[in-house]
Image (spheres, helix red, strand yellow):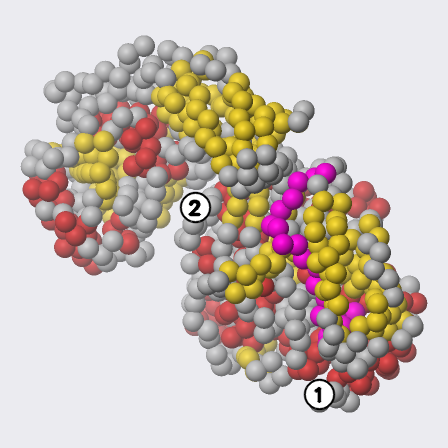
Amino acid sequence: MRQILGLITCCLFVFNTLSSQAPKNSSPADIFHSIEKLNFLGSALYIAAHPDDENTRLISFLSNNNKARTGYLSLTRGDGGQNLIGPELRELLGVLRTQELLAARRIDGGEQFFTRANDFGYSKQPSETLEIWNKEAILGDVVKAIRKFKPDVIINRFDHRTPGSTHGHHTSSAILSFEAFDLANDANAYPNQLKTTSTWQPKRLFFNTSWWFYGSEENFEKADKSQMLNMDVGVYYPMLGMSNNEIASIASSQHLCQGFGRLSSRGSENEYIELLKGDLPEDKNNIFDGIDTSWSRIKGGKAIGEILYGVQENFNFKNPTTHLPTLLKAYQLLQKTTDDHWKELKIEELTNIITSISGLYLETFTETPYANPGETADVQIQALSRSTVNVKIKSVFINSQDIAINDILLKNNELFKEKVILKIPTNTEFTSPYWLMEKGTLGTYTVNNSDLIGKPETPRAFITTLNLDFNGVIIPVTRAVVYKYAKPEKGEISQPFELIPEATASFADKVLIFADASSKRIPVIIKAHHDSISGTIELKYGPEWQVDKVSQPFFIAKKGDEKTIYFNLSPPSLENESTISPIIKLNGNEITKELVTIDYDHVPTQTVLLPSEAKVVRLNIQKAGDNIGYIMGAGDEVPTSLEQIGYNVQLIDPTTITTESLAKYDAVVLGIRAYNVVDELKFKQRFILDYAKNGGTVIVQYNTASRWGSQFENIAPYELEISRDRVTNENSDVEIIAKENSLVNFPNKINQDDFKGWVQERGLYFPNKWSSEFTPILSMHDKDEEITKGSLLIAPYGKGNYIYTGLSFFRELPVGVPGAYKLFSNMLSVGKDKVEVKENIKG
Ligand SMILES: [Zn+2]
């Protein structure tokens, strides 16, 4: 992957990530910076758990100040978090965050790696994390990352000695790194890996500490720092025109889906790292002190160093091309070294430098974003030399296909371009993130091709190799085949060229709730990725369900067009959960995947093929009341879910709230974190409480205490204190402690079965103190923790009711958890037990 993107060097100034697939242009200062990096043979690996855990200041400092090869191993891809910029969640969020990490590394100069660990959600203890992750497998992935990257030093973001003080994933990343530091050099550990790599002993292991880990700046000031190194990461790089912390801020601002866009910081700043293993360097400001990072560390390196240090010392900024003959000599010597690890890395760096100083522009692109296996695609090959250097194209290959361009002399500033036809073999794999090809477990992705484990993304399907002749020295230069086009409002854009099926099908809704026995008309959207396709579409469904037509024919004339086909699906009379999936039958092939495109300005467009399916749930649910008013908070899908079970839900504009305007609702629900994010509620809170007093039901879902405005010291009509209590194990036992309360009896009788099948967690930010008017309904706790009773609280207020709940309905309803629907329906129905109940069971 590194070869393809050619990102190791000279990309500090290319912040326009729209062209992250486009060729890089290098100024003499960039080239000089690359030569300094070429002449440093040392490496550092930073290890943590999630996208955004990484300290970009330190990564940038090691890469740009020390000039070291620097990597970030993020154990997970951050699938479990929230998305502030779009709809991607779970595995799709992991794809987006992977690309945000790659965008950050393009800026701070690092490289990116992963393990197969899945970010399954919050975990309090590393013991729980390592059980869910499959410790053996993930430890093996960390060992493999170390064996392949061969770092001299490793830095852990987190402390392996303090379980429970932070996310269990965090502590686990440090625990695994601590163990892998020794295992990487043990030939008996993970011996299969040694077929493709070799053992390696890093020299030093550090923990990237800071005052935060000591509770306060004063504590940290007093702490024993004899085992610590300290670096000023605020240094300014005159050659780059930027300071280290400015680069780091721009890099971490790539984490846009986590809301990390931030101001740049400037000026002197200290970073501390504490030695955990290995010898303490004498120079307490230099992590590489005492480690040979010169060309002498490799066999035959001394002669190469003599040449390349000379280039660095006498670099010609006015005309870097003059260094070409010397660099070619170094290239030839480098070819002869026997140290394969450094040889591969340094040849790639040197190749980039040679093409840069020759003013070479090389690009291969299509004019179509995608093609199907078995087709052909037009590929434009372009090459241009913008110097007096004699460069000849000897031959060109796309993968192993010789495309018959031979002995072309590139004359100064005369563009060579030729359109060639690329034959795409029928067995070419579709483009999709490799870790999502097979169904994984909750904690670990399944990756059948072990060569791919650790890689940030799936290698591009088509790589062009141009064999260039520089005065008799033949240097292969590689470029990925990309799709290049112009958008009138954005300019030139390069994005990955993708291989996708001829057609894909998807459901508009991923979860369908059948609250009674009536059938539903299910739309299936077929999208054509090829002209003139005709086939049939079938619906696969569970034995208890029924469909009017099993198979239907379709025809779509134009690539890119869609067609919607409907199936009438009837549910069984009893409660049931099942999945339905569309199968396209086309030219003897079955296509069962749907195509999802992730498209943002700050990362290259991603196409993801996922199993196409929807969950169907037949519920025996009863409800009272019809009209629900919903005040949206930070964003959730609860309103759509309530509509699925037959409620009429209206979104309320907070500015229009009055006591009268709310009177028409059977219940008023506040979306997650509404009091944290909707300022207007400061002024409207009294109307909301008055509505309850007059006989209404107010349901407040979780808010965090930390961003509590002083106006909300009493969001409830009585004393209620929000804590950080949460129950993160979605299977933890739940006890119903208020057995007679209407919340667990009307109109649906709630029992233990209703707490089965929950996802990710039980709930969060439960209150831990409340006045006597409140009745706690449920009791629950995580393993080895005290019980919490604040997950669901109800208090009568005037003629109505006030309910506060930290239960994660916002996660459970969208994935169709039956018990969560029944409990929510009961909350909405409170106080209506004396009124007539709507029977929803007609079948
Ligand atoms: Zn984290």
Report, in whole angstroms, how far the alpha carbon at label 1 lies from the one at label 2. 48 Å
Give whichever of 519, 444 is nearer the camera. 519
In the rendered structure, are the residues bearing label 1 and label 2 in contact, judged by CB atoms less than 8 Å apart? Answer: no
Which residues, given as a range, are shown in magenta? 350-374
Question: Is residue 144 at least partly visible in the picture?
Answer: no
Give whichever of 230, 81 is nearer the camera. 81
Q: Please name the residue shown 71% across and 81% down the image.
A: 32
Other-residue count near label 1 (Cα within 10 Å), few / some / many at <14 / 14–19 / ≥20: few
Please state if 179 lies on the left or on the right of 802 as rendered.
Answer: right
Please state if 548 lies on the left or on the right of 481 as rendered.
Answer: left
Quadrant for the N terminus in the image:
bottom right
Asked if 107 appears above or below 52 in the picture, the reply is below
Please state if 100 lies on the left or on the right of 661 as rendered.
Answer: right
Who comes first in sequence, dot 1 or dot 2? 2
Q: Please name the residue shown 48% across and 15% down the image.
A: 549
Query: Would you identify the image quadrant in which residue 361 lies?
Result: bottom right
Task: Say whether residue 314 is magenta.
Answer: no
Query: Would you identify the image quadrant in which residue 312 lies?
Result: bottom right
Other-residue count near label 2 (Cα within 10 Å), few / some / many at <14 / 14–19 / ≥20: few
Amino acid identity at mark 1: Phe
Cβ at disc 1 under 8 Å from ligand 1: no
Amino acid identity at mark 2: Pro
Q: Please name the residue shown 48% across and 52% down the image.
A: 166
Give whichever of 121, 815 is nearer the camera. 815
In percent of width and height, residue 445 lies at: 62, 39
Give whichever of 474, 677 is nearer the camera. 474
Asked if 581 appears above or below 450 in the picture, the reply is above
Q: Mark 1 points at which residue?
A: 317
Residue 87's mark?
A: 2
